[in-house]
Image (cartoon, helix red, strand yellow):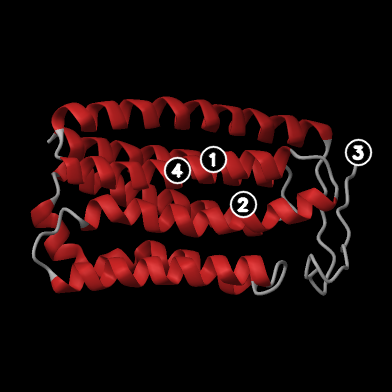
């Protein structure tokens, strides 16, 4: 098995973590992960184009702005994930790791935006949207400032942010089409199940499986956003 290890890169400019980061994947695992990311990039580019075009035709100017925010988060996550995971082991890979993990926060907040904006006249909805974006900004700062540290805390924050929308369940049920709600829930479940494989590092193809769940979860949420635009 070809084994790659990305060891700790200690320097003041990179704020290296106390523990070494390991990158232990054989050739087959790397190829599988590469295929998943290639599908994700293609899906993201096509889906983003379709959504913006349809929003321009069928939706309001506000919906176009909201859809653009969502698309920006989606493409940032897919693009940075592919760049980080497929980049050769090097100092640059350690830097890319920060942006990859930060993009997850951005995607969560960006995904919430179109759904919460459908809940009209709710102070709780506005407060939740502000809270989600503040948590995302805080998480991004944490990842950029302290790379390699607080990783378990970050995973917990991802899940808390992702499921915090349950506080608006009654309002969301009234505001969103039934199909959109179904895809939102399905996407959340897929993301959450994927975390199991993200942490199961001894499992072969663990990284590719995790990214497969992310791709499927993103596809579900995209379908829900598309349903809102076309309703």
- Res 2 label: 3
Find numbered disc 4 in the image and state the secondary structure of the residue it sits on: helix
**What is the crowding at mark 4: few (fewer than 14 residues within 10 Å), some, or many (at least 20)?**
many
Residue 6 lies left or right of residue 85; in this view the side is right
Q: Quadrant of residue 27?
A: top right
Find numbered disc 1 in the image and state the secondary structure of the residue it sits on: helix
- Give coordinates of residue 202: x percent, y percent: 75, 54
Give the mark nearest the N terminus, 3 or 4: 3
- Are the residues at dot 3 and dot 2 in contact (C-beta closer than 8 Å)? no
Query: In the figure, 191 relative to 36: above or below?
Result: below
Quadrant of the rendering where the C terminus is positioned: top left
Residue 110 lies left or right of residue 66; in this view the side is right
Q: Is residue 205 visible?
A: no
Nearest to viewer (mark 3 / mark 4):
4
Give the mark nearest the N terminus, 3 or 2: 3
| Residue for point 87% across, 62% down | 9
Q: Is residue 151 visible?
A: yes
Q: Quadrant of residue 2?
A: top right
- Give coordinates of residue 59: x percent, y percent: 15, 36
**What is the crowding at mark 1: few (fewer than 14 residues within 10 Å), some, or many (at least 20)?**
many
Residue identifier under label 1? 78
Find numbered disc 2 in the image and state the secondary structure of the residue it sits on: helix
Nearest to viewer (mark 3 / mark 2):
2
| Residue for point 46% across, 52% down | 191
Query: In the figure, 146 relative to 48: above or below?
Result: below
Residue 144 lies left or right of residue 187; in this view the side is right
Alpha-carbon span between mark 1 and mark 4:
6 Å
- Are the residues at dot 1 and dot 4 in contact (C-beta closer than 8 Å)? yes
């Amino acid at each position: 098995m070809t084994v790659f290890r990305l060891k700790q890169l200690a320097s003041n400019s990179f704020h290296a973590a106390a523990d070494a980061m390991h990158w232990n994947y054989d050739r087959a695992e790397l190829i599988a992960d590469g295929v998943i990311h290639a599908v994700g990039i293609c899906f993201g580019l096509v889906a983003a184009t379709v959504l913006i075009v349809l929003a321009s035709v069928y939706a309001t100017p506000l919906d176009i702005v909201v859809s653009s925010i969502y698309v920006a988060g989606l493409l940032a996550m897919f693009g940075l994930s592919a760049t980080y995971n497929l980049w050769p082991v090097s100092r640059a890979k350690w830097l890319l790791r920060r942006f990859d993990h930060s993009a997850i926060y951005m995607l969560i907040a960006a995904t919430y935006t179109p759904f919460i904006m459908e809940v009209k006249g709710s102070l709780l909805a506005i407060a939740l949207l502000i809270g989600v974006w503040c948590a995302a900004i805080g998480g991004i700062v944490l990842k950029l400032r302290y790379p390699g540290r607080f990783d378990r805390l970050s995973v917990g924050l991802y899940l808390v942010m992702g499921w915090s929308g349950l506080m608006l369940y009654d309002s969301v049920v009234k505001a969103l089409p039934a199909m959109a709600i179904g895809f939102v829930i399905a996407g959340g479940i897929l993301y959450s199940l994927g975390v199991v494989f993200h942490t199961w590092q001894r499992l072969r193809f663990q990284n590719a499986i995790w990214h497969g769940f992310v791709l499927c979860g993103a596809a579900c949420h995209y379908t829900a956003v598309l349903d809102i635009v076309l309703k």
